[in-house]
Amino acid sequence: MPGPAGAAPTAPALTAAAPTTPEQTTPKDPAHRAPRVVLAFDFGLRRIGVACGDTVSRSAAPLDAVPVNAGGPRWELIDALLREWQPALTVVGLPYNVDGSDGTMTLAARRFAAEVERRYGLQAVLVDERYSSREAEARLKSARASGLRRRRVAKADVDAAAACVILERWFTEET
């Protein structure tokens, strides 16, 4: 709107413009999302392997294996891991049978994932974990045979490494 005669025109009021080009909108592909820390769990009746990774490097590292007793997982240890790593979401391995059908452990893993969501308010994404423990054990044995790993491969090491495999699978599925 023009100002009084002889005065400089006033600038129009600034308003936020809606994005109009694809470059101005938030990209939907995972590579452009905000970086997120992710914790993965390899659920078992004796131990739950835990690994951590992030969506930027798309790599996973084994953290620990949480013992499971008659009363269930040692939730205080899982609490400590979540406080330390502060993940944006969790990934839980879902143990299907070879043919893809639910196995005896599938329901227990689903219940664990639901409890993680309930306790921590974090999404628990379910990922097919078939053969993850075998793959993890083979990786660890290969590292030991090549001299990269000196100590023997313990079951807890396999569980944490299996959680890495599960998380790496999730990273692959996300692209």
Image (cartoon, helix red, strand yellow):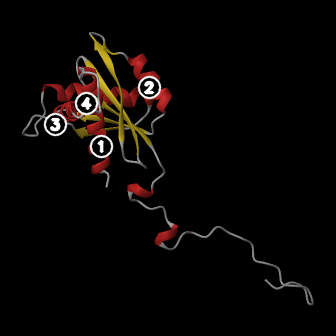
Q: Which of marks 3 and 4 is in front?
A: 3
Give the quarter of the image for residue 125: top left
- Image location of residue 113, percent across then percent down: 31, 30
In depth, the one of 147 and 129 nearer the eye is 147
Q: Is mark 2 on a helix, strand or loop?
A: helix
Label 3, residues with CA under 10 Å away: few <14, some 14-19, many ≥20:
some
- Image location of residue 51, percent across then percent down: 35, 32
Q: What element carries label 3?
A: loop
- Residues under labels 4 and 1: Cα distance? 20 Å
- Image location of residue 152, percent across then percent down: 24, 21
- Residues under labels 2 and 1: Cα distance? 19 Å
Residue for point 91% across, 85% down:
7
Residue for point 48% across, 51% down:
34
In depth, the one of 106 and 38 nearer the eye is 38
Q: Residue 168: which disc?
A: 1
Cβ atoms at labels 3 and 4 below 8 Å apart:
no
- Residues under labels 3 and 2: Cα distance? 25 Å
Q: Which amino acid does label 2 sit on?
A: Leu
**Residue position for label 2:** 81
Q: Residue 130: which disc?
A: 3
Q: Which amino acid does label 3 sit on?
A: Arg
- Residues under labels 4 and 2: Cα distance? 20 Å
Q: Residue 110: which disc?
A: 4
Label 2, residues with CA under 10 Å away: few <14, some 14-19, many ≥20:
some
Work out which quarter of the rendered image holds the C terminus and state it: bottom left
